[in-house]
Amino acid sequence: MLNIGILSDGRFGERTYNTLSKKFPTDFIIVEYSGDLDDITISDKTLKKLKDYNLFITYLNPDITYKIVETLKDINPDAFIIVGMWKGIGFKKQIEKFGNCYCPELLCEIDEKELNIFLNKYIQLKEFLKYFGRPKVKLILKDNKIVDYKIIRESPCGSTENTLKEFLNKDFDKIKMGLRLQHFCRAGKLDLFKERECKKVKAGKIFIEGLEI
């Protein structure tokens, strides 16, 4: 059975919690800890909770994220962590060496291909990907109006359904839909020195690619 823990400092992750809890037992957990950098101590209360779940999504600063992933490797080796907030390819390479986590550029890009090397060991990911990850949507049109839709798989952040609700009973226009999804997307702003494409724009394109008529 899939049990999900959203690990947060209280600022981010609530929308992901609201989305995932529609399908799976999900808890929003405020991580309590003391210290910083290489001297972080996770509270006993939080450590106890970390043993209760087999899938985590983190919204934490890099230092505590690293400590959480390292700790889970020891106390809950069957758990997998999707790092929902991270920065820097160096950090990504460092933390993924633990083998129990993945740092996606966007939560809406994860699918069986992205997580392929983890699926056999962490079988709970297969259940998760049935409903969440790279969006897949069946649209029902009548005279080019969207009269209904079926979400086969939606982004964990909830932007898929939020966008579709706004276009129900309106003319089908995939460009407008992709642009509107960017409004709901919580991805960071474009880093002019490191990125060629804004993450919000990429999320809009991923959403459009997942529409089926």
Image (cartoon, rainbow, N blue to C red):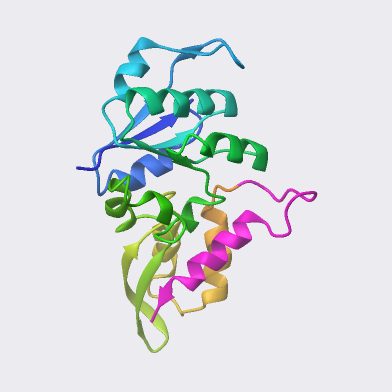
Residue furthest right in the image: 193
Q: Residue 43 in the image: x percent, y percent?
A: 41, 11
Task: Please give the name of the residue rendered at 28% of the width and 32% of the height, measured from the top-left corner.
Answer: 53
Task: Please give the name of the residue rendered at 45% of the width and 62% of the height, measured from the top-left corner.
Answer: 163
Q: Quadrant of residue 182?
A: bottom right
Residue furthest bottom in the image: 143
On screen, residue 118 above or below 174: above
On screen, residue 7 above or below 84: above
Relative placement, left or right, of 68 versus 22 is right
First to last magenta residue range: 188-213
Q: Is residue 193 visible?
A: yes
The verdict on residue 23 being magenta is no
Rendered-image quadrant of the N terminus: top left
Q: Residue 119 in the image: x percent, y percent?
A: 35, 52
Task: Please give the name of the residue rendered at 52% of the width and 65% of the height, measured from the top-left corner.
Answer: 206
On screen, residue 69 above or below 107: above
The verdict on residue 207 being magenta is yes
Rendered-image quadrant of the C terminus: bottom left
Q: Residue 95 in the image: x percent, y percent?
A: 54, 34
Relative placement, left or right, of 190 versus 182 is right
Q: Residue 16 in the image: x percent, y percent?
A: 40, 43
Task: Please give the name of the residue rendered at 53% of the width and 13% of the height, measured from the top-left corner.
Answer: 40
